Image: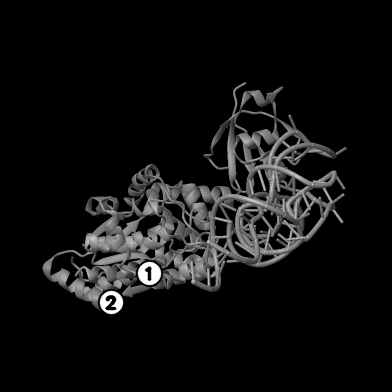
RNA sequence: GGGGAGAUGCCAGAGCGGUCAAAUGGGGCGGGCUGUAAACCCGUUGGCUUUGCCUACACAGGUUCGAAUCCUGUUCUCCCCA
């Protein structure tokens, strides 16, 4: 802990929406500085999907900032809460996951988290540790800690209630569980997206009731997805996953609307505000390439960043064929006289989920074999080993065929 | 427990006995323009061995020459009363 309170707060404040409260944080930091005891900074992850995307890294990076300042990250793996489904920001009930799914996801999550945080210096706890041991009576007691009216104050519940979208009873329990996690780990600070505000604040309430000092709540913005409108999420398909290939990741970064540039710089890099603002107004496209490169550095290192950039320049700026592409092996039973039906080829390459879709892209001129546009859905094409099949702007495959 | 409303394609939302694979909008996909940005324009969007056939409007039955549309039951949701 080499930095003073002011400096620490300045770093912590970057890109945050709310900090409840700054005075409390100042006090905690001061005490920590004196005693040499790091603050316990809590962040909960529910392993609901197999991947994390950049949206979640916003808050992870905030955690990283604390870690770099010498504080103690406490990562709660919500193995138990994942099985309920956090209703935050949702307009419908989340599916409840099986224990197996959760375990599988948890493992990949940690691996992905390690790209940002130094896992050796992170305390990782599963909240099943305490929830699994609770009796029904204790659950009832916990649920007595809040009221329906208070829960209904929340935007998302209120909206769902107003719109007549069902709210299941178990979803009401979720915020209490998250709050109880804070009690269990004696959090000094809890991080979360703005959609977590209510849950974070409830943590304070519960801690106070338990005689603990309430946690400081820090919320970060919700990162918009590549469509520039909705929040980044896997189910909306507008996400950039941290374990995607460099090519894919670079391309997706380039496809974000310009309007998002400064948000992305602010939340996903540590570049100073003046610098990126200038860059963006000078040359938006250059600024975007630079942003993409910076993001790739975090997940793929220098080599990966270079690879992603070169691929982008080659394929999309110069419109050339990429160096690497998935290979497809042709199913021999579909071949007659060395020829194959174009629709069948597209399906084998997984470029169309149905024959109808294949026919459509073909007749609309989206399909090329070796740069030759194929517009007849009934066409049979000569198979050549190494031929390049292309659909739309970005889907490529190389045909593997030995006669 | 009683009463009322409702369940349509990826989403929202029309249709309320034939002309409905289902209006319209959003999203997606493809094309054009371009900086894989935005904006804009065009096309397309259930499946198939595609000028035709098959499966579809919560589920199961029924009425009818014919049902997304009418009837009965079931499931689920919302609202009001208790």
**In this view, A12 is above or below A82:** below
Which of the 4 quarters of the picture holds residue A399?
Answer: top right
Element marked by disc 1: helix
For the residue pair A231 and A90, the one nearer the viewer reads as A90
Residue at image position (50%, 68%) is A161
Outermost left residue: A35
Q: How many marks?
A: 2
- Looking at the figure, which quarter contains the C terminus of chain A? top right
Q: Quadrant of residue A153?
A: bottom left
Left/right placement of residue B66 relative to residue A17 reads right
**x and y, in percent, of residue A162 in the image:** 53, 70
Report the Cα–Cα distance between label 2 and label 1. 16 Å
Query: Residue reaching furthest bottom?
Result: A23
Percent position (x, y) of residue A54? 43, 57
Q: Secondary structure at mark 2?
A: helix
Q: At which x and y percent is residue A201?
A: 33, 70
Q: Are marks 2 and 1 in contact (CB under 8 Å)?
A: no
Q: Tell me the residue that label 1 is attached to.
A: A197
Tell me if A156 is positioned left or right of A40 in this view: right
Q: Residue at x 51, y 53 (%)?
A: A235
**To which residue does mark 2 refer?**
A22
Q: Which residue is nearer to you in this view: A201 or B75?
A: B75
Pointer 1 chain: A
């Amino acid at each position: 802990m080499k930095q003073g309170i002011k400096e620490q707060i300045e770093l912590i404040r970057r890109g945050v929406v709310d900090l409840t409260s700054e005075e409390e944080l100042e006090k905690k930091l001061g005490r920590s500085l004196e005693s040499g005891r790091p603050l316990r900074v809590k962040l909960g992850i529910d392993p609901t999907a197999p991947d994390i995307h950049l949206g979640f890294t916003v808050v992870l990076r905030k955690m990283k900032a604390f870690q770099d300042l010498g504080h103690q990250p406490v990562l709660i793996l919500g193995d138990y809460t994942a099985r309920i489904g956090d209703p935050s920001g949702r307009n419908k009930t989340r599916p409840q996951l099986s224990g197996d799914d959760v375990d599988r996801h948890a493992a990949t999550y940690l691996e992905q988290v390690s790209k940002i945080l130094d896992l050796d210096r992170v305390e990782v706890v599963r909240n099943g540790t305490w929830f699994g041991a609770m009796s029904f009576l204790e659950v009832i007691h916990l649920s007595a800690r809040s009221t329906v009216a208070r829960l209904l104050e929340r935007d998302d519940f209120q909206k769902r209630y107003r719109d007549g979208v069902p709210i299941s009873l178990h979803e009401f329990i979720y915020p209490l569980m998250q709050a109880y996690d804070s009690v269990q780990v004696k959090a000094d600070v809890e991080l979360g997206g703005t959609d977590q505000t209510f849950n974070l604040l409830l943590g304070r309430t519960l801690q106070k009731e338990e005689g603990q000092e309430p946690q400081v709540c820090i919320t970060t913005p919700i990162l918009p997805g590549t469509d520039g409108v909705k929040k980044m999420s896997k189910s909306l398909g507008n996400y950039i996953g941290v374990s995607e290939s460099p090519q894919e990741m670079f391309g997706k970064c380039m496809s974000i609307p310009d309007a998002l540039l400064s948000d992305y710089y602010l939340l996903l890099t540590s570049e100073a505000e003046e610098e990126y603002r200038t860059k963006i107004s000078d040359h938006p496209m250059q600024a975007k390439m630079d942003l993409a490169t910076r993001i790739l550095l975090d997940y793929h290192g220098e080599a990966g960043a270079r690879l992603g950039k070169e691929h982008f320049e080659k394929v999309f700026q110069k419109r050339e064929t990429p160096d690497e592409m998935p290979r497809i092996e042709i199913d021999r039973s579909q071949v007659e006289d060395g020829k194959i039906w174009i629709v069948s080829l597209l399906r084998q390459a997984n470029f169309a989920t149905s024959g109808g879709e294949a026919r459509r892209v073909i007749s609309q001129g989206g399909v090329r074999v070796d740069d030759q546009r194929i517009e007849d859905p009934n066409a049979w094409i000569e198979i050549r080993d190494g031929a390049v099949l292309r659909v739309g702007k970005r889907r490529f495959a190389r045909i593997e065929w030995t006669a």
